[in-house]
Amino acid sequence: MCCDGAPVLLFTDNESNEERYGGKSASPYTKDAFSSHLVQEETNAVNPRKPAPKSAAHYDLKVPGRQECDSPSAFDEGGGDRKAAFNDFSSTMELRRKEADDFYRLGLAAACLRG
């Protein structure tokens, strides 16, 4: 993963949190580690051994009300030009926003039709 700036990189294993359902998890670093780390402030939820199968870039951003902020990141198989990873960021981000808007508009329209 290539990231713009210097975010804190978080890692976890690709394991379900079976303890939520009364079972025993195969790893202490489960798929919900990022939420647990950021929302519940459980600092031991993320995997301190780096890297691990799942990763996230944590940007500590202050975004004023009614404003927006983009935090560029891109997946790279390695060996690529890190700067080139962001060449199409703006156009890709705009396309993804349009796709999300279309998805939710169509989803809401379908929900209204169902009653």
Image (spheres, rainbow, N blue to C red):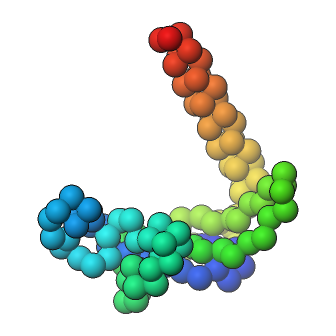
Question: 71 or 77: nearer the eye?
Answer: 71
How many numbered discs sit on the rendered protein?
A: 0
- The picture places residue 7, in percent across and down from the top left corner, at 64, 80
- Name the residue located 20 percent from the left edge and 71 percent from the top edge: 25
> Seen in the image, is 68 located left or right of residue 26?
right
- The picture places residue 27, in percent across and down from the top left corner, at 23, 76
> Seen in the image, is 54 located left or right of residue 115?
left
Question: 13 or 109: nearer the eye?
Answer: 109
Question: 63 or 93: nearer the eye?
Answer: 63
- Name the residue located 80 percent from the left edge and 55 percent from the top edge: 68
- Name the residue located 32 percent from the left edge and 76 percent from the top edge: 29
Quadrant of the rendered structure where residue 51 is? bottom left
Q: Can residue 51 be spotted in the picture? A: no
Q: Can residue 62 be spotted in the picture? A: yes
- The picture places residue 115, in percent across and down from the top left corner, at 50, 11
Furthest-bottom residue in view? 49
> Seen in the image, is 56 located left or right of residue 19?
right
Furthest-left residue in view? 23
Question: 72 or 16: nearer the eye?
Answer: 16
- The picture places residue 48, in percent across and down from the top left corner, at 40, 89
| Image vertical order of residue 34 relative to residue 8, above or below | above
- Name the residue located 60 percent from the left edge and 74 percent from the top edge: 58
Quadrant of the rendered structure where residue 73 is? bottom right
